[in-house]
Image (tube, helix red, strand yellow):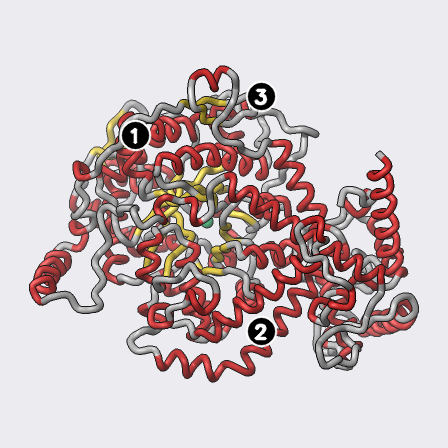
Amino acid sequence: MSELGNEESQETPFFKYHHLKAIQDHDSKYLGQASVAKSPSQGGSTKRDTLFFEEEEQELITQDRLPAIPLSAAVDDTPANMKTAYKDEAITAELRELYNTFQKCLDLREKYMMKSKQRFEDNPKNRDSWEIYPPPPPPSWPLPPPEEIASRKKKEKEREADPIAAVGIDFHREHIKIPGEHPYTFGVGTDGFYHVFKSEEDKANREPAYIVPQCKEFYDDLDYILTAVSDGPAKSFAFRRLRYLDSKWQMYILLNEFEEIADSKRVPHRDFYNVRKVDTHVHHSSCMNQKHLLRFIKSKMKKSPRDVVIYRDNDHLTLAAVFKSLNLTAYDLSIDTLDMHAHKDSFHRFDKFNLKYNPIGESRLREIFMKTDNYIDGRYLAEITKEVVSDLESSKYQMCEYRVSIYGRSINEWDKLAKWVVNNKLFSPNVRWLVQVPRLYNVYKSTGLVDNFGDIIKNLFEPLFEVTKNPESHPELYIFLLRVVGFDSVDDESKVERRSYREFPLPRDWNTASNPPYSYYLYYIYSNLASLNSWREERGFNTFVLRPHCGEAGDTDHLAAAFLTSQGISHGILLRKVPALQYLFYLAQIGIAMSPLSNNALFLTYERNPLPQFFQRGLNISISTDDPLQFHFTREPLIEEYSVAAQIWKLSATDMCELARNSVLQCGWEDKIKRHWIGANYNKSGVDGNDMSKTNVPNIRIDYRYETLLEELNALRRYAPKDQGGDGVALEDMTQRDMVGVAGLTEGPRLQQNMIHTIQHEPASHNESNTFEQQPHWHDSRRDSFPGVAVVAERARQRRLSQISANSK
Ligand SMILES: [Zn+2]
């Protein structure tokens, strides 16, 4: 796509309100429906404006659409065999090009997933030989022999007597065999990330054992994706394919709703409450709800006021002294004084939200109660964690993937965290861990903790390479990593990113005060992880995936960078504005952990959350809580999250069970356990992979999802030219389904003229505030509209020219 002109490459990939309206109006003209957009009850715009808008639009439609290229997709009379009689060379070439571009984007992602060993089959823990220690509780069905039942009942009694002491009781450190040293060695390469070498000689010759995409390659690929998704025709094409998926879903539900209900009723025992649900995105330091934390603080004040808990200003302070200095008694404390709930004041204010992590606004209390690395070695946090985990265990069907922080400020962080987990026996069949890396280089730099970005890379990854080479060097870390699923990159995405470099410097040369951009952080986590995973796979150790926070706010390149490098993402609400990328996320079935209640408090009100739409279209969505301490009110935050979603969006029981099934598919538990949870063949595609007696999702639903996805993927493969591995089908084999989206390629030249004109004079803004909320002015609705026939022809001409020049070289 690089041969395109400058205007196009600088175009925004966002899809704005007026795009949507333009397409809806256009479609309704063809389908003979009354236009929804212009009902008098809508909006506060004046009557004069509305009339004007209609008039102008009518004029445009009659002038622009008719003459140039005959449109067929919508008005075509249907031939029996679904083949289209429509054969316009310029349009089909354009269509082929589009399918081809999307296919190439998918291929790029596949390359990155493969080289970083993030695919399911790469991870040794998904193999049959993998042993899980401590083992998960045995299945309760079919019934075991009576003596076994008796011993289990006894255990259960003990657990009930002291549920908190029971957490991690079957973990015995000495039972874990620590493997020995490996001959390979490692070191930071000239490209700024860690490499693995088979010998010292290889290291001297700079011949790494595993090939990882270089930074420049990554930025070139990122550029390809961004250009592809910003391209006008690709945007409207993807938008229409997504609308096609919407319509298809409506039809499916109309026809099969009853069947789904009947199917669910036929499954004995299973319902929404006893299908497995994983909270795929929750921060450990806010995993408890407020009432729970409050109760815990009060009980500590009453029972152990003389604990020395903090060392500050050359003084050891007891808990009682700390509260005395705050002028508080246990009686004074309430949810309101605790003030950790995100209310209206945090909307679009991530900085304020971060302060909510401090109980009563006091960083001292956060230090004492919510840190793993403090004067009491995180004892209080471990205790309250056990309380939360014991709640999870007794609910049996709810699991959590807790995110814990490694900051990269010092080299000891990993060992401290691992010791905290292992020494406190924080092992539970209901818990796995993700490691979150906050993007705070600029903060550490300004306080002198690091000199350059390379220091952060070293602190983050050197201990991991050391423990992979020789697990005995950090035994606790080795044990902890067995339960770590992956990595996350966190911080406020809405912060402005400055592009001060044409080519980014290496990490060790990044020593300015400014923070590297999101994509830079992601690439260097990715590249180090790729080397590390390759080595770990070879050693038979579990590998890690990348599941960053992404698309909560900020630029599109966050989502594009995650599309290349990450197995899944959290949030992704901005995909609603980038249809081409959304379509790619659908095609690749990238897991998205969405948290609508969290979004509601921070970035996007509940009713505008795209979750229901994404879900209906068939994106791989799961529901998660993010921060129960700040957003939830009950003891079961995950159920609360599902329940609000079900109420507001009228989700059916099948929808809820499908979301729960998705969460299991996305999570990082071992293959053995997933098979127990959602069926032995869950890895197979379509109905073969569904076990209704475990998932409670009817086969017709799974079949519909699979068939729909397959149809889209096949279209890509069929139209990709033969020399690029596609089928390169002939014109006459095109079907009407393939033509969905074509109408978007042929909009009028006047719209296009208008677009170029307005882009030159007013650069389009990505700002949230002037997109969907505002009523459009008539001239707004023209800006950024689709390129027209003239553009299609021009692109075809340019392509031909560049081919000729390429051939002549
Ligand atoms: Zn989060």
Counting from the top left corner in percent of width and height, residue 332 is at 28, 51
One can see residue 53 in this view: yes
Please name the residue that numbered disc 3 is placed on.
Answer: 509
Q: Amino acid at mark 1?
A: Pro
Mark 3 vs mark 2, foreground winner is: 2
In which image quadrant can residue 805 be found?
top right
C-alpha span from label 1 to label 2: 51 Å
Q: Dot 2, how many residues are within 10 Å of its Cα: few (below 14), some (14-19), or many (20+)?
A: some
Q: Left or right of 120: which side holds 349? A: right
The earlier-in-sequence mark between 1 and 3 is 1
x and y, in percent, of residue 212 in the image:
54, 33
Q: Say which amino acid is labelled 2.
A: Trp
Residue identifier under label 2: 249
Kind of residue indicated by mark 3: Asp
Residue carrying label 1: 471
* Quarter of the rendering containing residue 561: top right
Marks 1 and 2: CB-CB under 8 Å? no
Name the N-terminal-most of marks 3 and 2: 2
Callouts 1 and 3 close, C-beta under 8 Å:
no
355 or 531, nearer to the observer: 531
676 vs 441: above or below = below
